[in-house]
Image: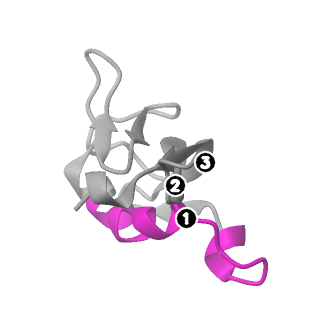
């Protein structure tokens, strides 16, 4: 971490890992979005991501952006499920880059 940075956050990629039911929202395995620079959500050009799947994983993303203790369950768990019982879409959250940041730039 440089002198200017007082914290570190991970950039994340959320990818549809598998679908156990039928794809109600039109997503497919491999569809993804990236969360960069703390709060920048990026989708590949021409792609979409279901707002209900996003809502299911969103509460965990701020924690996944931070280094967590080894024994923390969220440090180990990477799979999150969409709430649609017909779809049973499962997303994988991966850390892609550790980034030094200034907390003053984010508040």
Neighbour class for label 1 at 10 Å: few (<14), some, many (≥20)? some
- In this rendering, the answer to whether 11 lies above or below 61 is above
Q: Is residue 87 left or right of residue 99?
A: left
State the scheme by which the image is colored: one colour
Q: Position of residue 40 (x, y in %)?
A: 29, 41
Give whichever of 3, 88 is nearer the camera: 3
Circle 1 or circle 3, nearest the eye: 1
Q: Which residue is mark 2?
A: 9
The C terminus appears in which quarter of the rendering?
Answer: bottom left
Q: Please say whether residue 83 is visible from this viewpoint.
A: no
- The residue depicted at 44 percent of the width and 59 percent of the height is 88
Label 1 to label 3, Cα distance in Å? 12 Å
Residue closest to the eye, 27 or 80: 80
Asked if residue 9 shows in the view, the reply is yes
Query: Which dot marks residue 94?
Result: 3
Looking at the rendered structure, the secondary structure element under dot 1 is loop
State how many labels appear: 3
10 on left or right of 83: right
The span from disc 3 to disc 2 (Cα, nearest Å) is 13 Å
- Tell whether label 1 touches label 2 (CB within 8 Å): yes
Instruction: Give the camera-side residue of 52 and 103.
Output: 103
Q: Residue at x 42, y 37 (%)?
A: 34
How far across and how far down the image is residue 96, in percent? 61, 39
- Is the residue 21 above or below the residue 67 in the image? above
Which residue does the numbered mark 1 point to in the structure image? 66
- The quadrant where residue 62 appears: bottom left
Give the residues in magenta: 55-76
Q: Secondary structure at mark 2?
A: strand
């Amino acid at each position: 971490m440089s002198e200017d940075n007082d914290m570190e956050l991970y950039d994340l990629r959320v990818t549809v890992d598998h679908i156990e039911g039928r794809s109600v929202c039109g997503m497919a395995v491999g569809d993804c979005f990236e969360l960069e620079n703390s709060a920048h959500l990026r989708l590949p050009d021409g792609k979409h991501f279901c707002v209900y799947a996003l809502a299911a994983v969103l509460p965990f993303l701020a924690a996944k952006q931070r280094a967590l203790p080894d024994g923390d369950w969220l440090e180990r768990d990477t799979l999150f499920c969409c709430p649609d019982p017909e779809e049973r879409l499962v997303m994988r959250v991966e850390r892609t880059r550790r980034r030094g940041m200034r907390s003053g730039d984010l508040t």
